[in-house]
């Protein structure tokens, strides 16, 4: 007896309410379905069904076996699908949600190469700094930056989120460079408007377990967009804490200067900040989502390409 085939025939006969419907669905003879069920009953030593002229009635043993057989068949189907998906060619529409500044600098420029590698994938890209509900919006995958809130989403860490205290040479010539975190009290500190409070946080580099010190700041300029803050720093309006993925080119070109590099800086206390790829929870990750995350992880590298060779200690 093909035990899986017999279990499948039994489960479908029960679910559909008759041997004939189960046989038609599986393109089998009714006698074959009946023979499968009889073989199961002989093997188990118990009647699974009480048959009447109108419908099938499960016995107590049949109810128990049906429940377990249904679960087993579902696991077998998922195992087959998982194995097939490993070799399946990524294809179809991939809906991606990306923060604006990061997307423009570190995702969109690479999408041409991604499409060359995966020509059967069509892209629908949304750039927004709002946290979009992936399930409600129908997005397949998103890039999120910062600390992940408690969520049912599955997350893959793509890169660390590292911030540097930076200033422009013109501002530093007029106001001097801070020599310690406490010196920020006399500087114009440009703040990210989406975060409450007037403080930045820091701990000595190389001491990740140390408590972060709160540094109170004040400034004459706030913005809810990181690229706007970057331009304000370039224009000598003050100092800012900006991510390395945003300021790396300016640091290499000498347009900005890194400050107090012996400290690890944060704009808020709490859990690890990082660049994440997130997607809705599924038993099987679709090949197109896995292809995108694998591509981005490889393209970003470890350490991230934007952190390589920065002129800092």
Image: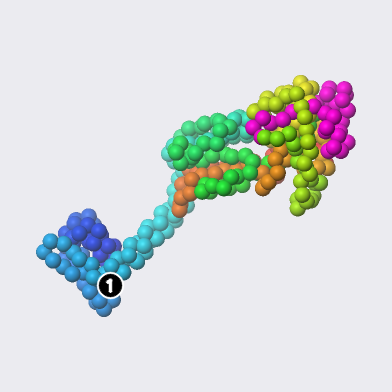
Q: Which residues are magenta?
A: 168-195
Name the side, left or right, on which 276 lies relative to 21.
right
Q: Which of the pair 14/123 is nearer the observer? A: 14
Q: Quadrant of residue 145?
A: top right
Q: Is residue 161 left or right of residue 286?
A: right
- Residue 275, image quadrant: top right
- Kindly identify the residue that appears in the image at 48 percent across and 49 percent down: 281
If the image is split into quadrants, where does the C terminus sit? top right
Tell me where residue 199 appears, x and y as whole percent. 75, 36
Quadrant where the N terminus lies?
A: bottom left
Q: Which residue is mark 1?
A: 61
Whole-percent x and y of residue 45?
A: 26, 78
Find the residue positioned furthest to the front: 197
Examine the rendering and report whether any part of residue 304 can be seen.
no
Q: Is residue 185 magenta?
A: yes
Q: Is residue 54 above or below residue 230?
A: below
| Residue farthest to the left, as pictured | 53
Which residue occupies 32% across, 65% down? Answer: 67
Question: In the visual, does 101 lie left or right of 154?
Answer: right
| Residue 298 pos. (x, y %) | 61, 44
Q: Is residue 55 visible?
A: yes
Query: Within 10 Å of the Cα at label 1, are there few (<14), some (14-19), or many (20+) other Cα atoms?
Result: some
Task: Give the residue drawn at x 78%, y 51%.
Answer: 210
Q: Nearer the viewer, residue 198 or 238?
A: 198
Residue 127, position as x, y percentages in the image? 55, 30
- Between 281 and 76, the one lying in front of the other is 281
Check the image and name the residue furthest to the top.
Answer: 235
């Amino acid at each position: 007896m093909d035990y899986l085939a017999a279990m499948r025939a039994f489960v479908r006969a029960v679910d559909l309410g008759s041997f004939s419907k189960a046989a038609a669905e599986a393109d089998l003879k009714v006698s074959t379905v009946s023979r499968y069920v009889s073989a199961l009953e002989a093997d188990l030593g118990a009647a699974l069904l009480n048959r009447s002229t109108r419908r099938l009635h499960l016995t107590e043993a049949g109810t128990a076996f049906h429940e377990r057989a249904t679960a087993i068949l579902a696991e077998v189907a998922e195992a087959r699908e998982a194995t097939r998906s490993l070799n399946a060619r990524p294809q179809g529409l991939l809906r991606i949600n990306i923060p604006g500044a990061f997307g423009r600098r570190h995702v969109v420029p690479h999408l041409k190469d991604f499409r060359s590698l995966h020509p059967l994938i069509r892209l629908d890209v949304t750039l927004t700094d709002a946290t979009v509900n992936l399930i409600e919006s129908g997005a397949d995958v998103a890039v999120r930056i910062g600390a992940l809130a408690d969520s049912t989403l599955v997350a893959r860490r793509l890169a660390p989120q590292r911030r540097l205290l930076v200033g422009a040479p013109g501002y530093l010539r007029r106001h001097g460079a801070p020599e310690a975190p406490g010196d920020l009290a006399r500087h114009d500190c440009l703040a990210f408007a989406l975060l409450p409070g007037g403080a930045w946080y820091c701990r000595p580099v190389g001491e990740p377990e140390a408590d972060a010190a709160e540094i109170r700041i004040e400034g004459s300029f706030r913005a809810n967009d990181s690229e706007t803050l970057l331009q304000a720093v370039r224009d000598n309006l003050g100092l800012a804490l900006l991510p390395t993925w945003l300021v790396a080119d300016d640091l290499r070109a000498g347009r900005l200067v890194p400050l107090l590099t012996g400290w690890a800086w944060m704009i808020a206390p709490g859990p690890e900040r990082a660049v994440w790829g997130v997607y809705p929870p599924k038993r099987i990750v679709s090949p197109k989502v896995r292809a995108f995350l694998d591509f981005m992880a490889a393209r970003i590298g470890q350490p991230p390409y934007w952190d390589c060779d920065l002129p800092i200690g």
